[in-house]
């Protein structure tokens, strides 16, 4: 296997592993925080016991997502409107905003009082988190029309729709301050699905690199065999 293929396989698997650990940390933090009405962002609120764990989880998402994006840098969309840049760029944009969100955290009971009264810290965190989610959903849409990746296309389209609808529902309920249990669980579900997409994306990239390398090696062997065989006269 070439060095480039090995690097991509390692990057994709490592990235998938990091975001998996991030999801586990988020779920553990939510259990420790206690309460089904806790929004994901609240886990990192200033002064809460789970703040450090939540920060580490976001940093793992940043590192893991960036690693997977590097491995899949050659994947692009067939649809012109989605092909202005690659899914990797969208993932890197998402990771950049998650990085800011990990350092500018919510205050207690965020994200409910985002606009009334206005708080710059809460507003910055929520804005970065929303943009990060939008960028991730855009990457999913781009991969829904990716060239030469039929399984990835179907999975990405399903996840893009699911994450968009569920996170939108959670956001509306949050702003309306209506039934925070449903809103908080919707946000957690959307987060879980988005992370699961990154994991599968990394695995698909790794598998594709391995298959492609084996196909190339098999082709080289067949070509060498034909060249080495004596011609009949």
Image: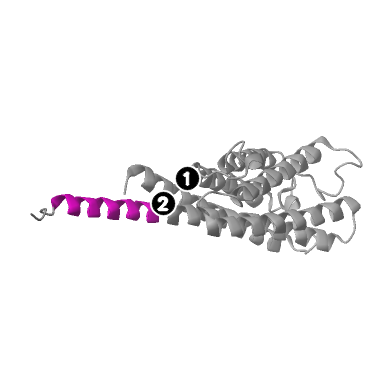
Q: Note whether residue 196 is visible.
A: no
Depth order, front residue of 156/184: 156
Name the residue at 38% across, 46% down. Answer: 5
Q: Characterize the magenta stretch by its predominant secondary structure.
A: helix
Seen in the image, is 49 located left or right of residue 122? left
Give the magenta range: 209-228
Give the answer, above or below, for where 46 lies relative to 167: above
Q: Residue furthest left?
A: 233
Residue 19 drawn at (x, y percent): 56, 53
Question: According to the image, label 2 marks what residue?
Answer: 209
Name the residue at 69% across, 63% down. Answer: 31
Name the residue at 51% across, 50% down. Answer: 15
Residue 100 drawn at (x, y percent): 67, 38
Q: Are marks 2 and 1 in contact (CB under 8 Å)?
A: yes
Give the answer, above or below, for where 120 lies relative to 31: above
Depth order, front residue of 220/136: 220
Question: According to the image, label 1 marks what residue?
Answer: 71
């Amino acid at each position: 296997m070439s060095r480039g293929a090995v690097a991509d396989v390692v990057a994709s698997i490592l990235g998938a592993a990091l975001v998996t650990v991030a999801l586990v940390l988020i779920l553990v933090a939510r259990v420790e925080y206690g309460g089904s009405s806790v929004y994901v962002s609240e886990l990192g609120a200033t002064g809460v016991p789970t703040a450090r764990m939540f920060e580490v989880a976001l940093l793992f998402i940043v590192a893991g997502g960036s690693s997977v994006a590097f491995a899949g840098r050659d994947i692009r969309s067939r649809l012109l409107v989605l092909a202005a840049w690659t899914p990797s760029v969208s993932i890197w944009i998402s990771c950049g905003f998650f990085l800011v969100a990990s350092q500018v955290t919510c205050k207690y009971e965020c994200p409910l009082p985002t606009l009334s009264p206005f708080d710059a810290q809460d507003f910055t965190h929520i804005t970065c988190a929303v943009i990060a989610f939008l960028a991730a959903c855009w990457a999913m849409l781009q991969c829904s029309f990716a060239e030469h990746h039929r399984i990835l296309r179907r999975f990405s389209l399903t996840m893009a729709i699911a994450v968009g609808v569920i996170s939108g529902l959670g956001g509306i309920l949050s702003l309306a301050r209506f039934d925070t249990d449903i809103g908080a669980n919707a946000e957690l579900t959307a987060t879980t699905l988005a992370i699961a997409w990154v994991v599968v994306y990394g695995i698909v990239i790794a598998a594709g690199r391995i298959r492609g390398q084996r196909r190339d090696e098999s082709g080289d062997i067949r070509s060498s065999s034909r060249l080495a065989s004596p011609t009949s006269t």
